[in-house]
Structure formats: structure tokens, C-alpha cells
Image (cartoon, rainbow, N blue to C red):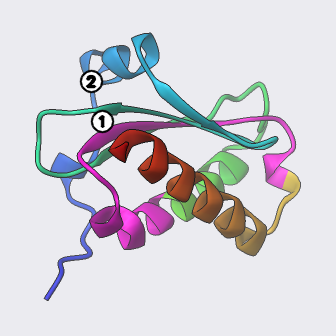
Amino acid sequence: MENYSYSRELRLLTPEDFQPVFKNAVPAVSPYLTLLARKNTLDHPRIGMAIPKKHIKLAVGRNRIRRVVREQFRHQQHNLPAIDIVVIAKAGIADLSNQEIDKILDKLWRKLVQRCSG
């Protein structure tokens, strides 16, 4: 039975966790989201988010994006290699429905798996 929890060890928490990903990353880009990934030394993927106020003014909107991304990651974590991922939101994402964001994320997860496995 696979564990679909979203525990603390699945998150990038400190600036020291984020820095290596920003320095040397494999990108997966869409008009609304950018995913940056880099292999880690652990046996599981980790995720961090950068959702700027500049693009999504209200906290409600930023939190909704975080919730959708977190939920998608929770379901996809067993299909992902041991990588650290930073999700960066772009302008216009707040106008999309949760289902549209899910579709974009599905494509981006597949791109990352392809690029980080090979």
C-alpha cells in the first residue's frame, strides 16, 4: 500500500533547500507555471513553491494555487524520481480553474520525469 501523505520531509523548507535547484535546474515550462527540478540525494521527491504577490495579488488566490499543486504532487509523488522541484507561478494562473491547472501540472510532471530520468 503506497503512502499518499504530504509530510514534512517531502517539502523544501529553507533557502538552503531552494538554492541548489535555482542554480542548476532542469526546467519544464508552460505559460502559467514553471517547474524547476534537480536530482537530490534522497530516495523521494521534494517540492517547494514560489508564488509571487506580483502575479497573484490576493492571499486567497495564492493559497488556492498552493493547495492544487500540493494535492497534485501528493498523488504523483510515487511516479516521480528522487528530485527537488520548485514550482513558480506566473501571471494569469489565478484565472484558470482547478481542473485546468491539474491538466497543466500533469503535462509538466511527465516532462520532468522524462528529462530527469534520461
Between 43 and 97, the one nearer to me in the picture: 43
Between 84 and 17, the one nearer to me in the picture: 84
Look at label 2 and name its amino acid.
Answer: Asp
Q: Residue 58, percent across and down?
A: 75, 43
What is the crowding at mark 2: few (fewer than 14 residues within 10 Å), some, or many (at least 20)? some
What is the quadrant of the N terminus in the image? bottom left
> Residue 91 got which mark?
none
64 on left or right of 14: right
Q: Are marks 2 and 1 in contact (CB under 8 Å)?
A: yes
What is the crowding at mark 1: few (fewer than 14 residues within 10 Å), some, or many (at least 20)? some
Question: Residue drawn 18% across and 52% down?
Answer: 44
Q: Quadrant of residue 76?
A: bottom left
Look at label 1 and name its amino acid.
Answer: Leu
Q: Residue 95, percent across and down?
A: 88, 55
**Above or below, comparing residue 92 to residue 108 in the picture:** above
Badge 2 is on which residue? Answer: 17
Residue 80 lies in the magenta stretch: yes
Dot 2 falls on a residue whose secondary structure is helix
> Residue 12 got which mark?
1
98 on left or right of 46: right
Question: Residue drawn 65% across and 68% down?
Answer: 102
**Above or below, comparing residue 57 to residue 14 in the picture:** below
56 on left or right of 17: right
Between 11 and 38, the one nearer to me in the picture: 38
**Above or below, comparing residue 24 to residue 13 in the picture:** above
Real-space CA distance between mark 2 and mark 1, rounded to the nearest whole angstrom: 5 Å
Magenta stretch in the rendered image: 70-94
